[in-house]
Amino acid sequence: MQTLKEVTIGNLGFPRIGRQRELKFAQEKYWRGEITQAELAQVAKDLRSTHWEWQAKAGVELLPVGDFAYYDQVLTLSATLNAIPERHRGEEQADRVDLDTLFRVARGRAPTGGDAPAAEMTKYFNTNYHYIVPELEADQSFTVAYEQIFDEVSEAQALGYRAKPVLLGPVSYLYLAKAVGGEFDKLTLLPALLKAYKAILERFAAQGVEWIQLEEPTLALELDSDWQEAIVSAYEALQHVDIKVLLATYYGTIAHHQALVSALPVAGLHLDLVTAPEQLAGFAANLQREQVLSLGVINGRNVWAADIDSIADRIAPVVNDLKGRVWIAPSCSLLHTPVDLDVEAELAPALKQQLSFAKQKLSELAQLKRLLTTPEKSGDRVEIDLIKDTCVSRRNARAEAADRQVNSRVAALSRDDYERDTVFAGRQTLQQQKYRLPLLPTTTIGSFPQTPAIRGLRSRWRKGEITETFYTDQLRQVTKDTVERQLKLGIDVLVHGEAERNDMVEYFGEQLQGVGFTQFGWVQSYGSRCVKPPLIYGDVSRPKPMTVDWAAYAQSLTDKPVKGMLTGPVTILHWSFAREDISREQIATQIGLAIRDEVVDLQNAGIGIIQIDEPAFREGLPLKRSGWDTYLKWAVDAFKLSAAGVDDETQIHTHMCYSEFNETIKAIAAMDADVITIETSRSRMELLTAFEDFEYPNEIGPGVYDIHTPNTPTVDEMVTLIEKAAHKIPLRQLWVNPDCGLKTRTWDEVEPALQNLVQATKVLRRRLG
Ligand code: GLN
Ligand code: ZN
């Protein structure tokens, strides 16, 4: 066996999509039947080989294998374990799984086999990556049924690489799974699962694999004692295979489990030292003899160039103490970063020099290794000085870019700036007098169908094929049409329809100072879907109105109120790559002020009802409960700051399209929006209970139209839902609206659904009013 050098460069995983999203395009072609499975496999193979080559060139010694997935790595693992829902099984034998089966689990359909409802998908911890939730039954068995990862190990070895398979660990796999077919304790499945993991590890050992990475991100949570015990029994069981286990943790500190983790019989431990640098000392001091410590020091979840020289200073003592047992690595898999900065030809140089994508992060590790291992008096010092100088000049550039106006405005804020003039009850009376809305006012959440015509216009405009004036004129036509349709439907509070917006965060990002965009900075969100988050690189401000013309134009067409439509500060922050030299709270405050300027301008332009969307509000909750209060405090404040600049008669709405409010209802109430609209139709109003129990004082629009399906809800269905809501919430507080925006639907679907919605409301006004 080769001996590892004094500091070893490690990597947990590399993005699979390819720098031009090659995987996405191949997947989608395969699903449409335009290429064969062999052609898809070739694209995948080429991507893996390119990505391994980049990593090897940067000096990564053990190459991650299994970070590639045709859809999602958790799903690949379910396939490997033969934990596939019966409804998705295809023609293959019961102890085998094939690629189309995988796609049926993920998408409900594949080029072969029958359709069946897809498995659930949900966010992987606190990231924007979505995994396919494994469905496990009480008598679930596990066998090794899918060969992909073993084939990839052979593939890497054939290319001359040392392969390190990477897998989600057994305890986190169980934790993320869903018990189906009746309630049971998932931990009862652990012994059977461990047998299958052992079989997998033995296969790897037989392939000549030395190290395997097992990831247990659940350790970043506050685990109950039975889950803690599961970790112990899992790694005790797996120690008997002749393979070295690197236990990888990420997304937060695991210091609260330090004693437990330090005692585990594993060959190596990986820590996320970006989110939790403070946990290093405790784990280093308790490292077992011969155990390896992998230091996750390069941020795997953000796009900024690392301050390599300060990282080197920070970890040098540990590197010296642990002589040869230190690995340096990104904090987590690079899955969450875009692939390659080199392809960004249009970025401003000042911004580009602050950035580092997955491929560049590998170079950062190589540079860090050089800083750590180059002797004081050596010819290589010139290069070392260069690395350090770059770090210093980046820091200086950031400091110089500070926007004094923004900073002094933030510094001058007082508590008054966060509060409306009058408490809700008083505002409600004034607003009722002003708008004279009927009982159960009807409204929508903002967007209306983004038709192929609208998307075509936008793409021609972006390519410069049509003029700005032509584009705007056309969209005004669309807006007018949207307003007329709402009038005909008889909706009470209208919207302009958001035809001019492609994405609710991108639209604002492009108009805000301090926010930038890449051309190819894509990150996988789920399956073949990628997102390109804005980069919040500087102090944020709003140079000029962003939405006022659209809202004012729509308002000019009708006497009914038109609701202005904005994205809130917390959502803009969460769906961007945010700078790290100031706190998230500070960034949210800056964005809050920018949105506040827009809110005030809308009011002054005659828009009396303004919605500030916060669909990502809940996503920001820290993994650990103990961090919730701090987060909620500043997130609520950022929203309030954005909303509180208006007069009492101006009605502020917010919208959140999920309905898990039990634990956050106090914070939701503290936001003090005059009206909140939420998604409740799927849960059949169950989730309104949080508002009922809390006696939520402001107005609420529980969604009665599930916009995620093409189906038309009937009048009766919606009457039932509104009645259910009326049992929980006083009638005078209730609004009637869909669950969320309608941009993904067609007019053919939307019009009859809204007709029924208005009809249902009329029925109830007669019955209850
Ligand atoms: N106003 C946005 C829309 O209607 C809200 C979208 C969202 O909640 N994600 O599309
Ligand atoms: Zn929504």
Image: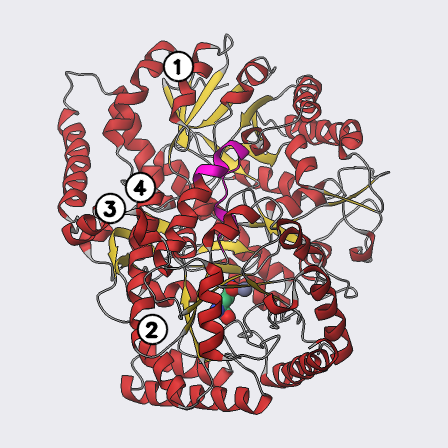
Q: CA distance from mark 4 to mark 3?
A: 11 Å
Q: Which residue lies under the disc numbered 1?
A: 324
Q: Are marks 1 and 3 in contact (CB under 8 Å)?
A: no
Say whether mark 4 is within 8 Å of ligand 1: no
**Which dot marks residue 580?**
4
Upstream in sequence: badge 2 or badge 4: 4
Q: Compared with residue 42, is residue 57 higher up or lower down, i.e. above or below? A: above
Q: Nearer the viewer's eye, disc 2 or disc 4?
A: 2
Q: Earlier in the sequence, mark 1 or mark 3?
A: 1
Q: Are marks 4 and 3 in contact (CB under 8 Å)?
A: no
Q: Say which label, 1 or 4, has the lower sequence index.
A: 1
Place of residue 628 in the rendered image (x, y in percent of width and height, measured from the top left): 50, 38
Q: Which residues are magenta?
A: 616-630
Confirm or reject: label 1 Cβ below 8 Å from ligand 1: no
Give the residue at x 53% y 89%.
487
The secondary element bearing badge 3 is classed as loop
132, 200: nearer the viewer: 132
User: Which residue bears the numbered disc 3?
Assistant: 354
Amino acid type at mark 4: Glu
Q: Are marks 1 and 4 in contact (CB under 8 Å)?
A: no
**Residue drawn at (14%, 40%), measured in percent from left and top?**
396
Mark with earlier residue (2, 3): 3
Q: Position of residue 93 (x, y in %)?
A: 84, 50
Please identify the residue farthest to the top as the structure is shown: 289
Q: Is residue 117 above or below residue 497?
A: above
Identity of the residue drawn at 48% across and 69% down: 429
* Disc 2 target residue: 603
Mark 3 Cβ and ligand 1 under 8 Å apart: no
